[in-house]
Amino acid sequence: MKITTPSEPKEVKTWMQKLKNTTFSDPTIDWDSYVVWAGNQLPKYLWGQWKDELKPLGFTWQKFLKLLRLRTDNMLLWYRGIIPWPRLVNTIIELIEGPLGKELAKIEPTTSH
């Protein structure tokens, strides 16, 4: 299966910018890391686009979030307009398809008894 680049979620980026400007406007605090994860808006968008490809590989929503947190730096760069959407997506796809993504996907969740 090939994971493709979905269209850029401009509405998510706009939502993030509005959230920061209206709720987290204190210039003495860097809220950007919180803003890119607020409401899981970007992860929800990507999971919605890719879940049909990722589930057969062994990914769950929780595993996807665990892996995606390792790309918070690139999510910030995209949010700030420093890197373009295709570059962000490529870094995430490389992580999914790389050794760490393959290892995480095959780990079975444990259940408490």
Image: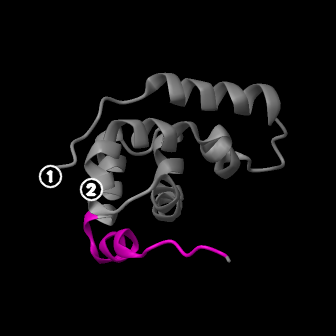
Magenta highlight on residue 101: yes
Residue 67: x %, y % from top left: 46, 64
Residue 38: x %, y % from top left: 67, 41
Magenta highlight on residue 107: yes
Q: Earlier in the sequence, mark 2 or mark 1?
A: 1
Which is nearer the eye, 55 or 3? 55
Q: How is the image coloured?
A: one colour
Q: Is residue 8 left or right of residue 44?
A: left
Question: Residue at (25%, 65%) from the top-left corner?
Answer: 97
Tell me the distance, in whole angstroms, between the alpha carbons under discs 2 and 1.
9 Å
Which is nearer the eye, 80 or 74? 74
Mark 2 vs 1: CB contact within 8 A: yes
| Residue type (three-letter) at the residue carrying disc 2 | Pro
Q: Is residue 85 left or right of residue 13?
A: left
Q: For the residue labelled by badge 2, is the local secondary structure a helix, a strand or a loop?
A: helix
Q: What are the residue bounds of the magenta stretch?
A: 97-112
Does residue 104 sit above or below 11 in this rendering? below
Residue beneath label 2, please?
Answer: 56
| Residue type (three-letter) at the residue carrying disc 1 | Met
* Residue farthest left in this picture: 1
Residue beneath label 1, please?
Answer: 1
Quadrant housing the C terminus: bottom right
Residue 30: x %, y % from top left: 74, 50
* Crowding at mark 2 (Cα within 10 Å: few <14, some 14-19, many 20+): few
Residue 52: x %, y % from top left: 29, 43
Q: Is residue 44 left or right of residue 26?
A: left
Question: Residue at (52%, 63%) from the top-left corner?
Answer: 66
Query: How many numbered discs?
Result: 2
* Crowding at mark 1 (Cα within 10 Å: few <14, some 14-19, many 20+): few
Q: Quadrant of residue 46?
A: top left
The numbered dot on residue 76 is none
